[in-house]
Image (cartoon, rainbow, N blue to C red):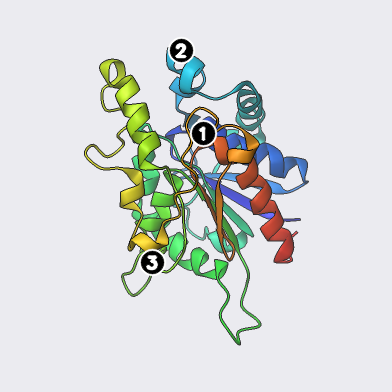
């Protein structure tokens, strides 16, 4: 059975970006485990599922239903801890890194112990010529989840994404959300004030694949944008979550992991 790790902060992850792949891959019969820093049951950004903001910019009804499935699961209520002695991401076939805007996501973006695990796992999403015995892994990251990889380093001190094509939350969407909500929510939509996610994940401009410029129609399936670089699959925001989940599944099948 294909084993999947979804790494989450204790609080603040986006419910759509975590729950849609959980639901999709659970329905495929995959074994999914939630991983947090210390094994604490996580909690999504509550603004995305209740209150005024949720009705405009929060999770859509299918995502809320998927989050109910996720949050009631045994793995969610009893997560594993990436700080446990002997824990290894190499025990999993697929790694999923959701994002989120709440500043609680900094726990996972800046976590040194998680970065060590990522430095072992992520290189296996890329083949090496003539190494036929090399393990194959799949990694999916979306929105601020891309920053988790971008800020982690390989043994040479380079970003794990330094030679990989990627997308993430576009600057125009982040700016729009910030401008619309700043009078009420302040810098909520600026996880790192003064900086935009797209600029924080790039080593070179050539790496970044922004995707189509769309606003009002961007939840439509035909507007979804996903970038594959071998077995690394990135996406921008919750509107891409369904296509992103499907692509993660397809890449794992192609790699013989499912």
Which of pointers 1 and 3 lies earlier in the amino acid sequence?
1
| Element on which disc 2 rests | loop
Which of pointers 2 and 3 lies earlier in the amino acid sequence?
2
In the picture, the disc for residue 162 is: 3
Q: Nearer the viewer, mark 2 or mark 1?
A: 2
Indicate left or right for 234 with 205 as reference.
right
Q: Is residue 47 above or below residue 194?
A: above
At 65% from the left and 29% from the top, the residue drawn is: 66
Q: Residues within 10 Å of mark 3 (few under 14, many from 20)?
A: some
Indicate left or right for 237 with 230 as reference.
left
Q: Residue 174: horizontal and vertical position, in percent? A: 36, 35
In the picture, the disc for residue 51 is: 2
In the picture, the disc for residue 41 is: 1
Q: Residue 6: horizontal and vertical position, in percent? A: 56, 46
Q: Nearer the viewer, residue 213 or 6?
A: 213
Q: Nearer the viewer, residue 126 or 117?
A: 126
């Amino acid at each position: 059975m294909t084993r999947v790790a979804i790494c989450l902060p204790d609080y603040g992850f986006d419910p759509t970006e975590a729950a849609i792949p959980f639901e999709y891959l659970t329905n495929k019969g995959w074994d999914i485990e939630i991983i947090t820093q210390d094994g604490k049951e996580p909690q999504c950004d509550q603004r995305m599922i209740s209150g005024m903001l949720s009705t405009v910019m929060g999770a859509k009804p299918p995502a809320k239903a998927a989050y109910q499935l996720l949050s009631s699961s045994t793995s969610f209520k009893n997560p594993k801890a990436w700080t446990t002695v002997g824990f290894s991401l190499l025990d999993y076939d697929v790694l999923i890194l959701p994002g989120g805007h709440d500043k609680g996501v900094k726990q996972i973006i800046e976590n040194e112990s998680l970065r060590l695990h990522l430095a072992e796992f992520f290189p296996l999403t890329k083949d090496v010529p003539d190494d036929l015995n090399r393990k194959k892994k799949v990694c999916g990251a979306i929105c601020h989840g891309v920053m988790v990889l971008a800020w982690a380093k390989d043994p040479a001190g380079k970003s794990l994404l330094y030679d990989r094509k990627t997308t993430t939350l576009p600057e125009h969407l982040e700016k729009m959300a910030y401008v619309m909500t700043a009078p009420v929510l302040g810098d909520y939509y600026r996880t790192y004030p003064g900086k935009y996610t797209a600029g924080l994940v790039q080593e070179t401009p050539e790496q970044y694949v922004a995707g189509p410029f769309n606003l009002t129609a961007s939840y439509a399936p035909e507007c979804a944008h996903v970038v594959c670089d071998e077995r690394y699959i990135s996406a921008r925001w919750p509107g891409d979550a369904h296509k992103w989940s499907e692509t993660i599944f397809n890449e794992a099948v192609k790699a013989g992991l499912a």
